[in-house]
Image (spheres, grey):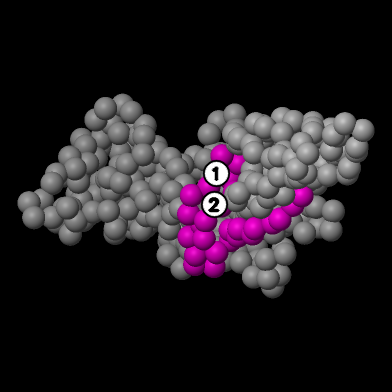
Amino acid sequence: MPPAFIAAIPGIIAGATLAEIVTVASIALTVGTTVFGAVQQKAAAKKAKRRAAQAREDFLNSLQERTITRIATDAPHRYVYGRAMVGADIVAILSSGPNEEFKHLVCVHAAHESDGIEKIYINGKELGPLDADGFVTSGEYYSTKTESVTETFSAAPFTLAHMPSSAVRVVAYGTWISGAFRFPSSGEVPYTVSGKTITVTAAPTSPFPFGGTMQITHYSVSYQYQTNTSQVRVQKHLGAPGDPADATLLAECPDKWKSTATLTGFTYTVIRLDLRQPEFQGGVPDIKVLMRGKKLYDPRTGETKWSQNPALATYDYLTSEMCGVNPADIPLSNIITAANVCDEQVPGLC
């Protein structure tokens, strides 16, 4: 079996039924044999042998190293077809923060544009949903702490520095005036709360039986609030044309990461780790992503979009830089037949 066809299978084989795999394998075998026969007629035997050997080596590497996290500036290119769990090639490690407490990992997952990154795992643990800025919002790398605070204001209404998570206690301080008498005084006052805004609704009641009014000098507000801390932030880059350099690296590591570092055509993530998390103090963690890989050309529709169709993945792999087969040498009718078979639903199977 031609090495190119074998290498196209691993990323998408899990998404095909047994019947589809057997059928498309037999059809693609014919396609591959025809294509490589044409290539051998047009190219020197030595060049063809070298290309086949390289394809075989790349295939073996993809099976053994697809889910490995490695630190490398010149790692082999990884092609991802269908939906697959893959590792990371870390091409840069940067630090930031007043005490360099943040570590930034630039992780390449595929050497092409991809359709999406669905899940991210660190040391085997899924990060879960991210907020708009890429911070984790739950799980082991997210913590919540309750803080108590007292703030002082000269007049009402007033806005608190934090969103209160408990009942608020508002105390007015000043001088109680009754006729010629003046007494330092304080007392709780009623209020309404809307978000972080406190509005006092009445003056404090008299602490003395002879009445009077209170000249308020300031208010003291005591309450509790929650602080949420995320130890991990992730920025995703799918390799789309024109994607600029990562904005967080430009802002936080301006002397180490330049606007020309766009990693054009690569699917990558920028993962920031808080080194105050003990787990991250022992070195680079294992990083994996579940992703939807390369967008595939479909000769039946003329569209290029994500697909788990094994026949379309085979066609893409043969014509990619990895194999370099001229599309004109491939019998599209065979590819179309194989693609149609792969799209068929087998009764009783999903």
At mark 2, the secondary structure is loop
Q: Quadrant of residue 42?
A: top left
- Residue drawn at (14%, 44%), measured in percent from left and top? 344
Q: Which residue is mark 2?
A: 137
Along the polypeptide, which appears first: circle 1 or circle 2?
A: 1
Q: Decide if residue 303 is on the left or right side of residue 233.
A: left
Kind of residue at disc 1: Asp
Residue 21 screen position, x and y as percent = 21, 56
Determine the main secondary structure of the stretch shown in magenta.
Answer: loop
Residue lying farthest front? 210
- Residue drawn at (58%, 45%), measured in percent from left and top? 134
Count of labels in the image: 2
Kind of residue at disc 2: Thr
Residue 65 in sight in this render: no
Residue 224 screen position, x and y as percent = 66, 52
**Tag 1 and tag 2, C-beta contact below 8 Å:** yes
Other-residue count near label 2 (Cα within 10 Å), few / some / many at <14 / 14–19 / ≥20: many
Q: Is residue 59 magenta?
A: no
Q: Which residue is mark 1?
A: 131
Cα–Cα span, label 1 and label 2: 7 Å
- Magenta range is 123-150
**Residue 328 against residue 230 in the figure, above or below:** above
| Nearest the eye: 104 or 10 | 104
At mark 1, the secondary structure is loop
